[in-house]
Image: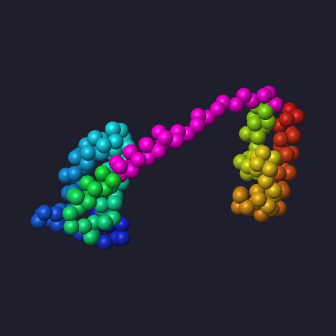
Amino acid sequence: MSLPNGQPPVEALQLGVTMSFDELFASELRSMIRLAVGLVDVPERAEEIVQDAFEKTLLAWPRLRTPGAYLRTAVVNGCRSELRRRRVVRRHPTPEATSVELGESDARLLSALAQLTSQRRIALTLRFYADLTEADIATAMGVRPGTVKSLISRGLNDLRKVVER
């Protein structure tokens, strides 16, 4: 195993015992997951936090004197961040998406749009729903204004064919 910078792993000194990162991982994984689950109550999220903490530990490995303490601190800080994020979500919940009833003509138009190429559909949507200029559409799509004109023209022709069927 090598570090992200390509160097071979450095042995760390922890309480007078030389330990490699692999040994730290093997010896601390379960206890760190138990700690994280105890703090955040969601095993899947706890495992993610622990993996992130191990990654931070590996990146800091060459300068660590007590990697176990560093790892534990990283796990606790990750859990605290998760709990803080949850509090914010509880205080400011995202509004529920409202269901929009589409009329027959809207449903037909959406069905027709779905049959276009993605580039033509994007150009038409930005032009007629977002009311952007051709220059703004070109910037948003990363193409030239002439390409936008072509996409809109061809997209409208395709829509006419689909609607006339």
Judging depth in this view, the residue of 32 and 78 nearest the camera is 78
The colour style of the image is rainbow
Q: Residue at x 22, y 51 (%)?
A: 28
Residue 65 in view (yes/no): yes
Q: Identify whether 7 is placed above or below 74.
A: below
- Quarter of the image for the N terminus: give it: bottom left
Judging depth in this view, the residue of 35 and 105 nearest the camera is 35
Residue stretch in magenta: 78-105
Q: Position of residue 8 (x, y in %)?
A: 28, 70
Q: Is 79 inside the magenta-drawn segment? A: yes
Q: Residue at x 86, y 51 (%)?
A: 153
Q: Is residue 148 left or right of residue 62?
A: right
Judging depth in this view, the residue of 80 and 129 nearest the camera is 80
Q: Position of residue 83 (x, y in %)?
A: 38, 45
Q: Position of residue 2 (x, y in %)?
A: 30, 66
Q: Is residue 8 left or right of residue 114?
A: left
